[in-house]
Amino acid sequence: MGFDHIDTAACRERGIHVCNTPDVLSVATAELAMMLILMAARRAGEGERLVRAGHWTGWAPTQLLGTEVSGRRLGIFGMGRIGRELARIARGFEMEIHYRNRTPLPPELEAGAIYHEDDASFLAASEVLSLNAPGGEGTRFWLNAERIAQLPRGAIVVNAARGSLVDDAALIAALRTGHLAAAGLDVYNDEPRLHPGYLALENVVLLPHLGSATTKTRDAMGHLALDGIAAVLRGETPPNLVV
């Protein structure tokens, strides 16, 4: 869905059509974001590594104690298609939905979510923060040290949108100090390379950009891409035209 990696001005100058594939990946990516929330909160990555390394010695009453997400406050940065799908899923966990967006949604799309017009009130409310905004210069390093400091101590951060939304050094520092309890990441700056500081942390879940990785979703994305190509070859305006 994102096209921030494409030089749209150069494409426009050369008469190159650029299309994306929205909608069809919203559910899959929102499910992935919810999975990251659960994995980070319940320390699932740490637990699996413990078992696979052969270091698990059996159940213990204080082993890998995590956090329940049910009833917690979920802050969604970017309440577009994917953000709204995540809100729908999170309501099943009785999470209270807060969101930050360019403008408030109409009531039928908001569905009871609480809009914040400034970062300070939004971040203070976000016990769990999910980044679901598009990439690009307008959101580059939005989650920086200053904003992280405004999150409640022990908050959880997940990113299934774009790696460029996060200042890696600031996030790593907050995970090391314990200001943030955990993080779950599916996207990175300069991927497939990622900041080596993440690899030394136990309290971060690291996935290889799996947001839309279901057979149903990838098939649908491929068909939308083919529809765009066919429309251009017929001399028609393709669906989902962004340039």
Image (cartoon, rainbow, N blue to C red):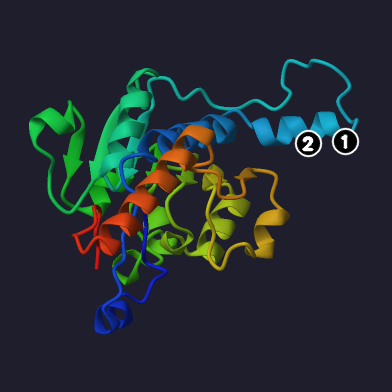
Q: Which residue occupies the foreground of this view, 41 or 174? A: 41
Tag 1, which secondary structure? loop
Whole-percent x, y for residue 205 in the image: 62, 43
Say which quadrant the C terminus sits in: bottom left
State which quadrant residue 55 falls in. Answer: top right
Q: Where is residue 172 in the image (x, y as percent from the top left)?
A: 58, 58
Q: Can residue 125 be seen in this view?
A: no
> Residue at label 1?
53
Quarter of the image for residue 54 reads: top right
How dense is the environment of label 1, judged by Cα within 10 Å: few (below 14), some, or many (20 and up)? few
- Which amino acid lies under the numbered mark 2 shown in the image of this protein? Arg
- Which quadrant of the view contains residue 128? top left
> Looking at the image, which is closer to me, 145 or 85?
85
- Say what amino acid the circle numbered 1 marks: Ala
Q: Is residue 84 visible?
A: yes
Query: From the viewer's perspective, is residue 107 above or below residue 156?
Result: above
* Residue 165: mark: none
Identify the residue shown where x is 21% and y is 64%: 235
Lateral position of residue 11 relative to residue 154, left or right: left
The answer to whether 202 is drawn above or below residue 107 in the figure is below
- Residue at the outermost left position: 106
Pointer 2 residue: 49
Labels 2 & 1 near each other (Cβ < 8 A)? yes
Q: Please name the residue shown 24% across and 52% down the image.
A: 239
Q: x, y percentage for residue 104?
A: 12, 44
Residue in the image at 50% along x and 22% along y: 68
**Mark 2: which secondary structure?**
helix
Q: Is residue 87 rendered to the left or right of residue 67? A: left
